[in-house]
Image (cartoon, rainbow, N blue to C red):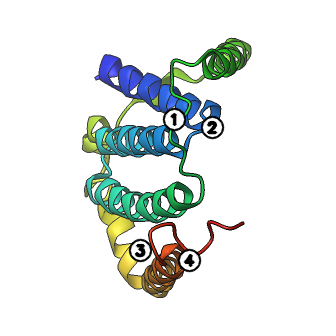
């Protein structure tokens, strides 16, 4: 379990570096999907099954809206890919920063934080994600509705901005 958590955390960091170092929205959207999926698998490994499912669905909905908007505004015939020298240099600097930050914080790292919720089941009377599910529907129900409405409004705005003839409404900008 430790190795799988470590592997998914490395995938999360790689996805974050891809998102932050890439100027093209197509590859940045690919990195966002990688980051969302790795983060949800990490949550899943720590006992948050329902939370990871809801988070993944919300992230995918938000990423599709952002990707449609950015692809409509910044469409290039030849986007700069992951293997371009500028992108590789930027990614190397980010990886170096992550390694240096990890080395600096390694001494104060607490090793028990790798323990999942299900490994401590003898001390608990319910699963780890049950409390989060009840809070989403009791205290967070209004905020969940507001979030759904905001995502729907954002989708409608993006569809109106990019509609038009073959080039979209904001191409003259």
The residue labelled by disc 3 is 135
Q: Name the front one of labels 3 and 1.
A: 1
Q: Can you tell which quarter of the image residue 53 is in?
A: bottom left
Mark 2 vs mark 3, CA separation in Å: 38 Å
- Counting every numbered tag in the picture gives 4
Q: Quadrant of residue 95?
A: top right
Query: Helix, strand, or loop for circle 1?
Result: loop
Contact (Cβ within 8 Å) of mark 4 with mark 1: no
In this picture, residue 60 sits left or right of residue 23: left
Looking at the image, residue 70 sits to the left or right of residue 106; the answer is: left
Residue at the spot 25% in from the left edge and 42% down from the top edge: 122
- Between disc 3 and disc 4, the foreground one is 4
Q: Residues within 10 Å of mark 1 (few under 14, many from 20)?
A: few
Which element carries disc 4, helix, strand or loop?
helix
User: Which numbered marker is on residue 23?
Assistant: 2
Image coordinates for residue 29, horizontal then vertical, percent:
46, 46
Task: Measure the C-alpha gap from mark 3 to mark 4.
Answer: 36 Å
Please tell me the numbered disc located at residue 78: 1
Q: Is residue 138 above or below residue 7?
A: below
- CA distance separating discs 2 and 1: 12 Å
Q: Indicate which label's residue lies in the foreground, 2 or 4.
A: 4
Circle 3 — which element? helix
Residue that mark 4 sits on: 161
Q: CA distance from mark 4 to mark 1?
A: 23 Å
Pointer 4 local density, CA inside 10 Å: few below 14, some 14–19, many at least 20: some
The disc, 2 or 1, on the residue closer to the chain's N-terminal end is: 2
Q: Does label 3 or label 1 sit earlier along the sequence?
A: 1
Kindly identify the residue that appears in the image at 71 percent across and 17 percent down.
Answer: 93
Q: Nearer the viewer, residue 58 or 131?
A: 58
Among the two numbered marks 4 and 1 on one chain, the one whose residue lies closer to the N terminus: 1
Question: Compared to 30, does 139 lie above or below?
Answer: below
């Amino acid at each position: 379990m430790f190795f799988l958590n470590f592997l998914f955390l490395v995938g999360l960091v790689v996805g974050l570096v891809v998102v932050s170092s890439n100027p093209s929205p197509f590859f940045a959207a690919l990195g966002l999907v990688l980051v969302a999926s790795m983060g949800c698998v990490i949550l899943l490994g720590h006992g948050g099954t329902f939370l990871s499912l809801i988070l993944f669905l919300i992230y995918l909905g938000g990423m599709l809206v952002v990707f449609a908007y950015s692809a409509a505004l910044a469409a290039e015939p030849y986007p700069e890919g992951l293997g371009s020298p500028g992108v590789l240099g930027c990614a190397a600097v980010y990886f170096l920063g992550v390694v240096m930050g990890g080395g600096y914080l390694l001494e104060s790292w607490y090793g028990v934080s790798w323990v999942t919720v299900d490994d401590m089941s003898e001390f608990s009377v319910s699963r780890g994600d049950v409390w989060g599910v009840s809070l989403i529907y009791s205290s967070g129900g209004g905020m969940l509705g507001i979030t759904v409405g905001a995502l729907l409004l954002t989708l409608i705005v993006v569809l109106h901005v990019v509609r038009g003839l073959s080039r979209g409404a904001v191409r003259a900008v």
